[in-house]
Amino acid sequence: MNIFVYGTLLKGLERESALMKSEYSGPAMIQSQLFDTGYFPGVKEGANTIVGELYKADSETIDVLDRIEGYDEKNMRDSLFIRKQIQARLFANGRYVTSFCYFFNRAEVKHEIPHGDYRRYILEKETDKQWILAYGSNMNSARLVQRIGPPDSLRKGYVEGFRLVFNKKAQKAQAAYANIAFSGDNVKCPAVAYRITSHQLNLLDQYEGTSDHYLRISLPFHAIDGNDTIVQAYIAHPDQLVDGQKPESEYLEHIQKGYEEHGFELGYLIC
């Protein structure tokens, strides 16, 4: 059974171990509304974009999740959450997958999380400065500084299970921009995490065309120095994916300079 999760079951959060025996299918999105209930997140019917993760889970795991979410199919009225069938959309290829998701079954909520990403919500509550992932042209620190000024610090590392692709359609040319797509085990994408202020992050949003072109979502990041963490990354909106286009030479040059600057093998750069 496919299950879409959006809260404490996400990678890096307190209940991720409940899905340790399930197959991870990658980041995905649904249309709904995400709320902070005051204790944990909950979704209700709506038309906003909710960012989460998609898994293939067996019946034993679903039973565990039902207990965690307080769902009793024989007593729907008193269940804390209701497991409903929905259509989840994978970021990697834009494909819709019939899945299940737990919907909050109470009236009381604290407030809505408008960007629909619970891990990002937690990160932004903790501090004004955020780790933002660069895997494309912003790996060239000179390009990043020209756009938003110098970062506070940086970490080099990889996004495990993802590969670098060029399938984000350009706005004004017959070309493609960088993107990362989940591919599964035994692959990884070189990346640099920059620590920047919320003001710098807002400036970068404008360059990346958030959220029509790229969505800024939370992802686990494996740092070479061992400081694994959750970061924010720009991933192409599924509506913006394109096949058969190549990056422009000047754009690709920025990425190559970034790889050389941070010591990554150019073999990861396939386009």
Image (cartoon, rainbow, N blue to C red):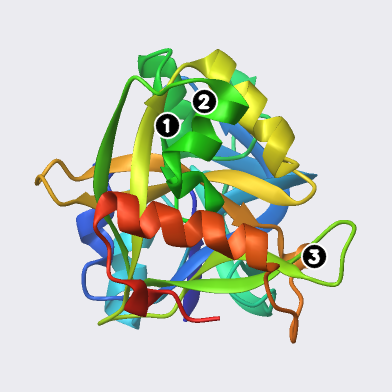
Whether 244 is drawn above or below 6: the answer is: below
Q: Position of residue 67 (x, y in %)?
A: 32, 55
Whether residue 154 is visible: yes
Residue wearing tag 2: 37
**Is tag 3's residue or tag 1's residue first in the polypeptide sequence?**
1
What is the crowding at mark 3: few (fewer than 14 residues within 10 Å), some, or many (at least 20)?
some
**Foreground disc of the pair 2, 3:** 3
Name the kind of residue labelled 3 in the image: Asp
Residue wearing tag 1: 40
Name the kind of residue labelled 2 in the image: Thr
Whether 256 is drawn above or below 48: the answer is: below
Please state which of residues 65 and 47 is positioned toward the viewer in this rendering.
47
Name the kind of residue labelled 1 in the image: Phe
Q: Are marks 3 and 1 in contact (CB under 8 Å)?
A: no
Q: Are marks 2 and 1 in contact (CB under 8 Å)?
A: yes
**Is tag 2's residue or tag 3's residue first in the polypeptide sequence?**
2
Q: Is residue 40 left or right of residue 107?
A: left
Residue wearing tag 3: 239
